[in-house]
Amino acid sequence: MKIKTYAILFLAIVNGLSVYSQEIIDIKHANGDMTMLVRQAIENAKGKDIKLVFEKGEYTFLTDYAIGKYLYVTNHGNGFKKIIFSFDGFNSVEIEGNGSEFIFRGQTAPFVFEGCNKIDVKNLTLDWDIPFSFQGDVIAVNKKEQWYDLKPYTNGYSWKLSKGRIVFPNINHFSFTSLGSSLPHNKETKAVDYGAWDMSLNSNYVEELANGNLRFYDKNVKHFPRVGSVLQSKGDKKNNRYAPAFLVRNSKNITFNNVIIYHALGMGFLCERSENIEILNSGIYIREGSDRVISIIADATHFANCKGDILIEKCRFEGMYDDGTNVHGTYVLVDKIIDRKTVRVKLGHDQQMGFEFAGTKDEIWFIKNPDPRRKEINVVANVTVINDYYSDITFVNSIPEDLKKDDILENKTWNPNFTMRSNIIRDHRARNIIIKTPKKIIIEDNDLSSMMSSIMLRGETFYWFESGNVEDVVIRNNRFKHCAYGGSEHAILKVSPRLAKTFDVTIPYDRNIVFENNRIETFDNRIIWADRLDGLIVRGNTIIQTNTEKPKYPDAYMFDLINCKNVEISKNVYKGNSKNGIKTDEASAKSLKVKRNKGFSQKF
């Protein structure tokens, strides 16, 4: 295994003439573990501008010689991580894969970028030789005796039956001891099964039958999988999000182009406190010909407290076990008023531990119970971290006199403009898109199919503590097909703030949404379900009721408005049998405008 390095000089004019040298590192294909080779190439770099160029081939990366580091990773389990590609403090990093495939084994964080000014990754595929999942064909179900039989998948999977438990994947001294998060899948399409509910399985006892099948006895199952489906499990919630395929923090000017991820032990692309991000012509999906029904363990893309412009364009996301994208800020709780300029704050969720909520010069909004609206703005002068949950924030100016314990703060500075264009998102758990940023949001020309709501706008002041409300959203020219097919009740577009009970439910939270010129083909009724929304235009959409499945909620309304105002529903066409057009409460009806629609009642 050899590497070849050389430098190229670049000229740049920024307030005068400057010269910098980019170090090119050619990595030739070789068999065996490549971890130490790439580690040394990065660690021995002569400067802060580096480009790794891989000869096309299949490369193997094991964890024996990986970098070990304790990492706080938002929406994942914190802990000691094994890192293969670690880029810390580089000015620029480029990775040219030339169509290569990287195969990983065991618990690893493949790529970690920290404090980089430019990142460019392209023409690369990631996979694991053995997935961190267990799956089996559902052969029989006995609800009365509370058991189900699976024909387990063995080729390419790693598991064993030990003392009446399924233990998997048995790699590098790690295994799940329960099936944990599980869902049934359609064997032909690999999509989550119609009517499926999220399950956390911890069987009382598992026995091997004479024919090699496994019988799972479980007294806690509420929704048994369908016979003929494929039951897939990814382990318990505490341990099943090890790390994303790509973790980017405190960096900027980031581009992923033609990057394909077949499997990962968490999210696909995760960016924290970073700015100006593009994910182009890329994908997260199951390898063609594979019998897996899952690609990655969590969200395809996730952006926490980012800013600048985020663009996801011409990508394909399928088979992941959470959202297609989640864009959000972070709410922190006021724990204590220290003095007239200093507040002690607390991170609310255990998967936010260690998250950097704010830095010097950031602008912060104050949000005070019971009003969920953003109020005063102040500038951070200093942050003193107490531990992974608590920090003291000192402001330039005095804090509001009426600020109190359990009020919340939101970072105003770190919010992005977001565009999602010409993508395919389908056949996965949860929502296609869940988003919370007050800046410009454009969702256009996408093909979307969802287990839950296709698009969800939900800031929440408890549990995940993901801020905040939207202010400017355009959803246009998309094609929604076969949506909200899971067991729980959802909609094509669901606007549903999840605020603590102390907040006033009559005050609008989200604002200014345009939903226009979309084509919707789905079997159930709910199209838009909105709560506490001020400013919604639903215009020029075509809605076609299909017969692909039996409606799960036939009494639901196409448009359901709660505590909303300034809503217009106009020039939409409905083709179907539902008689339930528009439902409003008294508050929503006052300013509602309904005109020139076809195929459903104009009454409300």
Image (cartoon, rainbow, N blue to C red):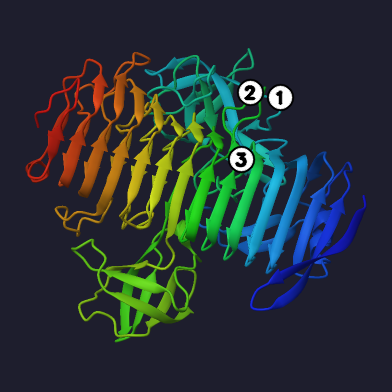
Quick check: marks 1 and 2 in contact, CB under 8 Å? yes
Q: In front: 76, or 159?
A: 76
Image side of residue 245 versus residue 146, left or right: right
Marked residue nearer the N-terminal end (1 or 2):
1
Marked residue nearer the N-terminal end (2 or 3):
3
Q: In front: 206, or 563?
A: 563
The label number, if any, that marks residue 126 in the structure image:
none
Marked residue nearer the N-terminal end (3 or 1):
1
Which residue does the image show at 44% across and 18% down from the upper left?
226
Q: Quadrant of the C terminus?
A: top left
Q: Amino acid at mark 3?
A: Ser
Please provide percent x and percent y for residue 65.
80, 56
Q: Dot 2: within a 10 Å radius of its alpha carbon, few (fewer than 14), some, or many (20 or more) residues?
A: some
The label number, if any, that marks residue 155 in the structure image:
1
Please provide percent x and percent y for residue 490.
31, 33
Q: In front: 154, or 266?
A: 266
Q: Amino acid at mark 1?
A: Asn
Tally the marks. 3
Q: Residue beneath label 2, please?
A: 291
